Image (cartoon, rainbow, N blue to C red):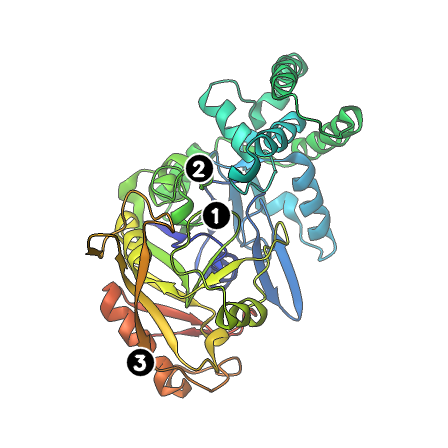
Amino acid sequence: MSVDLLLGLQWGDEGKGKIVDVLTKNYDIIARFQGGPNAGHTLEFEGIKHVLHTIPSGIFHKKVINLIGNGVVIDPVIFKSELNELKKFKIDYKKNLYVSNKAHLILPTHRLLDIASEKSKGKGKIGSTLKGIGPTYMDKTGRNGLRVGDIFMANWQKKYDKIKKKHLKILEFYNIEIDFNLIQIEKDFFESINIIKELIVVESENFLFNAIKDGKKILAEGAQGSLLDVDFGTYPYVTSSTTTAAGACTGLGIPPRSINNVFGIFKAYTTRVGSGPFPTELFDDFGEKMSKIGNEFGSTTGRSRRCGWLDLVALKYSIRINGVSQLMMMKGDVLSGFDYIKVCTAYKTKNEIIKYFPFSISNEDIKPSYIEIDAWEEDLTKIKNEKKLPLNFKKYIKFLEKELEVPIKIVSVGPDREQTILRI
């Protein structure tokens, strides 16, 4: 079993990019398996912050291959912009960045459809990043999509024109005013397509099969979080892909028996971007403090993240559906100096108290049941050794390990690569 899997256990934004970067030295291949440029994986080292949207988070390690798998949807324009950013740091991505020929392309009209769909919902909008992700996955499952491999085919332009025509008819149906210049958008799109043609495009499932056969170590990198999974998340306020462990198999073409460790990442509190239910959301000074200290703004959209106490009901649910074997806790440093800390251990409904994640967690039906935990005053950001962590913070970790029944192996105490404590 040579494949480890890393994914988020909440509503995304857990800090997956940083942990992938920290772990990359232990692997030969880092492979993204789902999502699109709605993801924003932030890495920070040597005083510089890097934000990746499509490219795997191991790209700054020269000897590691980074693969964009078939389960990912690619916006060529955003992708080109990411590649240009890498040039500033002299990253030779033409050698260590591979792209699956089965990954689907986000077309200019996909983004327009996303905007029209969201506007049509009014107050009931999903909270889409408007990157065209949903419409692209809809075309994928509807067997109308265009893939990276198509750009090398003789009938590429004909295929593109056919689906564009279909999309424009759908936009007419929405009858919603959108300001756009399709000629300019397409110009940028086709210029970016030419950049993809210069990269290493592979039959990714075959590439990974041979890598596994050769004993290469692979880390599958997920995007978003388990509570945004299209099947198991807080539907319909979810993303359009499978963000849980199963998505690694379909998004990369690897067999389940190849998976070894499943690393689950969570924050010491909870955040959510966009619409949707959030039982532990705070609207008081504690929530504002989390947001300010934690710099809780989406790395892709810049939108403010909603903040709340840690929800163990939801976290246990994510751990179970993913088969998590190791946990990584992020942003414990943000809670330093709080008067106290609360943790949701159950939900209160109209008729009972439940400890499982139900069909719906709408805020009208569900209220959190909390226990209060002693906080810590000490600043964690300069601590390098687990033994020097404050006693109450250690107690918090032990409490969570007991409740979750999975060991917490990594504790992050700041955004930088060096602000990471490995627990034996």
Residue holding disc 3: 395
Distance from Cα at disc 3 to Cα at disc 2: 36 Å
Query: Mark 3 is on which residue type?
Result: Lys
User: Which labelled disc corresponds to residue 223?
Assistant: 1
Q: Position of residue 36 (x, y in %)?
A: 55, 40
Seen in the image, is 325 located left or right of residue 289? left
Element type at mark 1: loop
Q: Position of residue 262 (x, y in %)?
A: 33, 54
Q: Nearer the viewer, residue 158 or 165?
A: 165
Q: Is residue 168 above or below residue 362?
A: above
Q: Quick one: label 1 or label 2, which is nearer the N terminus?
A: 1
| Residues at circles 1 and 3 in contact by the CB criterion of under 8 Å | no
Query: Mark 2 is on which residue type?
Result: Ser
Label 1: how many residues lie within 10 Å, few (<14), some (14-19) or many (20+)?
many
Q: Residue at x 63, y 14 (%)?
A: 169
Distance from Cα at disc 1 to Cα at disc 3: 30 Å
User: Which labelled disc corresponds to residue 173?
Assistant: none
| Residues at circles 1 and 2 in contact by the CB criterion of under 8 Å | yes
Residue holding disc 2: 241
Q: Is residue 235 above or below residue 29?
A: above
Q: Quadrant of residue 415?
A: bottom right
Query: Mark 1 is on which residue type?
Result: Ala
Seen in the image, is 353 located left or right of residue 263? left
Distance from Cα at disc 1 to Cα at disc 2: 9 Å
Name the outermost residue toward the front. 350
Q: Is residue 283 above or below residue 195?
A: below
Q: Quadrant of residue 406?
A: bottom left
